[in-house]
Image (spheres, rainbow, N blue to C red):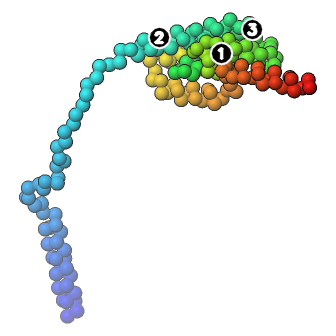
Amino acid sequence: MKRKTFQLISSFTITALFITVATGCNQDNKPPSNNASPKAQNISYQQTAPDTSLPAKRSKVKNDSDHLVQLAKQVPQVKEASAILLGKYAVVAIDVNPDLDSARVGTVKYAVAQALRDDPKGKSALVTADVDLLHRIKKMNEEISQGRPIAGIMSELGSIVARIAPQPSNEVKKRERDETKQDRKDTH
């Protein structure tokens, strides 16, 4: 008797489970609801002409950078120079004779900063005598001339500026005045 009851309950449960699964998997033939498809949106756009002035801008930047390089090369002891100019900021890297001691290298950097100070493009230039940075700046100039986006170059330039201990050309005059004031105090 227990066995028959168990079989009856089992059969009933299996049948109920089968009916539930069969009706649950049955697809309804209802039309799709209005929420199923996205609403149409008006999209407006403005077509612009390509910026044809970009090559001219790059050419002007290259000419200005070359001008700063020429100013730096006019300073005695400067063997090679490279400059990158973005906006009103510039970084000028120089290569000097490796036999010079660090004090003399500092004097040469200072002389380059003085030469750049009087030029409108070099007024806020940073000067470094690091040969590795000289080569990096040359490579960056090549990438600019090849049309690489300025955003990537700005990132690299930021790391260069963070690396150097700059000799800003616009502070040359201020440093001279401070040294003169200190000399007067020492003599009194």
**On the picture, is 181 further left or further right than 166?**
right
Residue 164, position as x, y percentages in the image: 67, 26
Cα distance in 3D space between marks 2 and 3:
29 Å
**On the picture, is 130 further left or further right than 31?**
right
Report the residue at 8% width, 55% height from top: 31
Q: Is residue 91 visible?
A: no
Determine the image quadrant of residue 137.
top right
Residue under label 3, please give it. 77
**On the picture, is 33 further left or further right than 151?**
left
Residue 118, position as x, y percentages in the image: 64, 12
Q: Is residue 69 visible?
A: yes
The secondary element bearing badge 3 is classed as loop
Residue type, label 3? Gln
Viewer-proximal residue among 117 and 181: 181
Viewer-proximal residue among 130 and 6: 130
**Which of the two discs, 3 and 1, labels the residue nearer the N terminus?**
3
Residue under label 2, please give it. 59
